Image: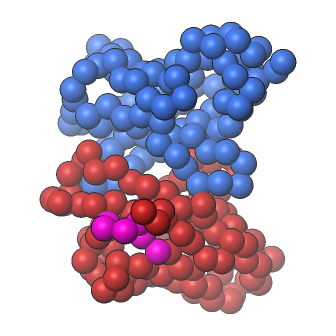
Amino acid sequence: ETGVTQSPTHLIKTRGQQVTLRCSSQSGHNTVSWYQQALGQGPQFIFQYYREEENGRGNFPPRFSGLQFPNYSSELNVNALELDDSALYLCASSLALSGSVSDEQFFGPGTRLTVL
Amino acid sequence: AQSVTQLGSHVSVSEGALVLLRCNYSSSVPPYLFWYVQYPNQGLQLLLKYTSAATLVKGINGFEAEFKKSETSFHLTKPSAHMSDAAEYFCAVSGAVSGYSTLTFGKGTMLLVSP
């Protein structure tokens, strides 16, 4: 069974640029959630995709957007990068049967984004 | 709205000593609670979860946590610390909002283990 993978591992961008982060979900999972973890903080929910549709979003501006593909892999896109976007971005996959609160989320190793 | 408060950003113990990491939650509905561990430069690994069954939950690596509704707490314990337990620990509460579930995390507690 393949776990959650993310690419790239590290990324350096400058302010104003755009970035795309990728996530492959665990085999058999149909839901992907993205989290932002700033230095010294806990992860914060960005959004969730279920069956290729965004079905939940945290308190992040529209320049954070995403996609989920038919194979349930996902992308996180961030436009007009700001210095505060520097963080570890975590992807988590789960098998959501009905949005149950007990759905266990399996996390990938994350992508470290640095914005200069 | 749901929230999690982890008391103590850093906890230091000696190898072999009791580990106690504190977590208090706020939830308007019966909560589902999780503890995750994060080793340096890695993602989050689930230690254990409470999903309204037994109030004492046993997890991996000898960790356990007890759900106490009256105290709104879900503290993580381990009887004897090992050097390999040094990592950051996150408590999280799960909530269902408009048909989807998400995790709300605390700020984390760094566990330091000295020989």
Q: Which residues are magenta?
A: A24-29
The residue positioned 75% from the left and 26% from the top of the image is B83
The residue positioned 25% from the left and 47% from the top of the image is A101
Q: Establish if B96 lies above or below A115.
A: above
Q: Establish if A96 lies above or below B72.
A: below
Residue B28 versus residue A66: which sits nearer the camera?
Answer: A66
Q: Quadrant of the N terminus of chain A?
A: bottom left
Q: Residue A102 sits in which quadrant?
A: top left
For the stretch drawn in magenta, the main secondary structure is: loop
Q: Establish if A67 lies above or below B32.
A: below
The residue positioned 40% from the left and 84% from the top of the image is A67
Residue B106 visible within the image: no
Q: Is residue A102 left or right of residue A91?
A: left
Residue A69, horizontal then vertical, whole percent: 35, 86
State which chain is coloured red: A
Residue B108, horizontal then vertical, whole percent: 59, 38
- State the hue of chain B: blue
Q: Residue A50 sits in which quadrant?
A: bottom left
The residue positioned 57% from the left and 40% from the top of the image is B37
Q: Establish if A78 lies above or below B25.
A: below
Residue B58, horizontal then vertical, whole percent: 40, 24
